[in-house]
Structure formats: structure tokens, C-alpha cells
Image (spheres, grey):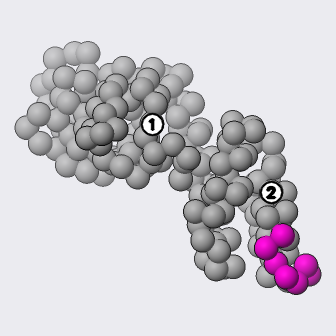
Amino acid sequence: MYEARYPEVDMAVMIQVKNIVDVGAYVSLLECNIKGMILFSELSHHRIRSVSSLIKVDRIEPVMVLRVDKEKGYIDMSKQRVSEEDIQTCEERYNKSKLVHSIMCHVGETLEIDLEDLHVNIGWPLYQKYGHAYDLGELDQALFLYLDGQSQDHHNPLTNDILIKITRRLE
């Protein structure tokens, strides 16, 4: 879960192909939880002999954002314009984000704290300060401070247990 609802133009994002139609493929942007489209003309620089060899339903892969229409909710993407460097950066960011989101979900479910509150109070400030909530090992400290401030009982064994697990996962 990111603070921005829509991705930036020229940003590499992870998608999952949902449906292939006559003109392109409908996809789900995994990091933003919104839908987009890749036109067949944006699949490859070369002549397309077989669409199924280039894109498959349920496949997860990085693509480049071409256009974002926030009013209509349309997002156009390209598979051919994403570079190897963009692919690597996108995959690293996605894997880190997946881990952070998993930790936030676990903490929220276990301690019955709203997931959005955790993101607003912990995740997003860490993204703004360090570029990613995962970086610099700050996530466990930020969670500790937040949970310590939320808890009436400062020696809550459940909170301490969760923080130990978080620290292990981030190592």
C-alpha cells in the first residue's frame, strides 16, 4: 500500500495479467491494487506472431507506465519500453514492499490495529524519509515506537513477540 493512489508516468511497476482481449491485455497493478491495460503494440518491438508467447494470464512481471488518466482511472502500460535496469529496480522494490506489507498485515491482524493506520503512521513516513520503509532497518524501530505509544501496558508480551519476529524477518 502506497501513499500515492496512482503510479507515476515512466515508472516501472509489477503487474499480473488478468485477461487477454482483441486489442491488448487487462492487468492488475499489484503495488497499487488498480487495473490497467497493455496494448498489443506495446508488447514487443518485433512483429508479433503469437501473443501467447509474449504474455500469459496470471503471469507477474514488470512493465512501464505510459499514461495515467486519474479522472477516468485509465492506466496504459508498455512491456517493450521497460529496460533491464528498470526491471531489476522494480523487482527489488516490489519484493521489499511485499515484505513490509506482510509485516504490517501481521501486526494489524494480531493486535487488531487498522492496516491503513499502520501505513499512515509508520510506512509512509519511512518511505518519505528513507525512500522505502524496508531500508535502514528502521521499520522495526518505528513499529516499536508506534506500538509502544498505542499500548497501555508497556510490557505487553504480544507486542514484544511481534517485534522480535519483525526484527528476524528484516535481517
Extreme residue toward the left, this view: 22
* Lateral position of residue 95 relative to residue 58, left or right: right
In magenta segment, residue 64:
no
Q: Earlier in the sequence, mark 2 or mark 1?
A: 1
**Crowd class of label 1 (few under 14; some 14 to 19; many from 20; radius 10 Å):** some
Q: Which residues are magenta?
A: 149-155
Q: Residue at x 30, y 51 (%)?
A: 58
- Percent position of residue 112, x then y: 64, 80
- Percent position of residue 160, x then y: 85, 75
Question: Helix, strand or loop at disc 2?
Answer: helix
Q: Considering only vertical position in the picture, is 18 above or below 153?
A: above
- Percent position of residue 163, x then y: 81, 68
Q: Amino acid at mark 1?
A: Pro
Query: Which quadrant would residue 45 be assigned to in this image?
Result: top left
Q: Residue at x 53, y 22 (%)?
A: 85
Q: Residue at x 21, y 40 (%)?
A: 25
- Name the residue tied to disc 2: 142
**Crowd class of label 2 (few under 14; some 14 to 19; many from 20; radius 10 Å):** some
Name the mark on residue 107. Answer: none
Question: Helix, strand or loop at disc 1?
Answer: loop
Q: Considering only vertical position in the picture, is 153 above or below 119?
A: below
- Percent position of residue 78, x then y: 31, 27
Q: Of 88 and 114, which appears nearest the observer?
A: 114
Q: Main secondary structure of the magenta part?
A: loop
Query: Which quadrant would residue 27 be assigned to in this image?
Result: top left
Query: Which quadrant would residue 114 be assigned to in this image?
Result: bottom right
Q: Of 156 and 63, which appears nearest the observer?
A: 156
* Lateral position of residue 105 relative to residue 31, left or right: right
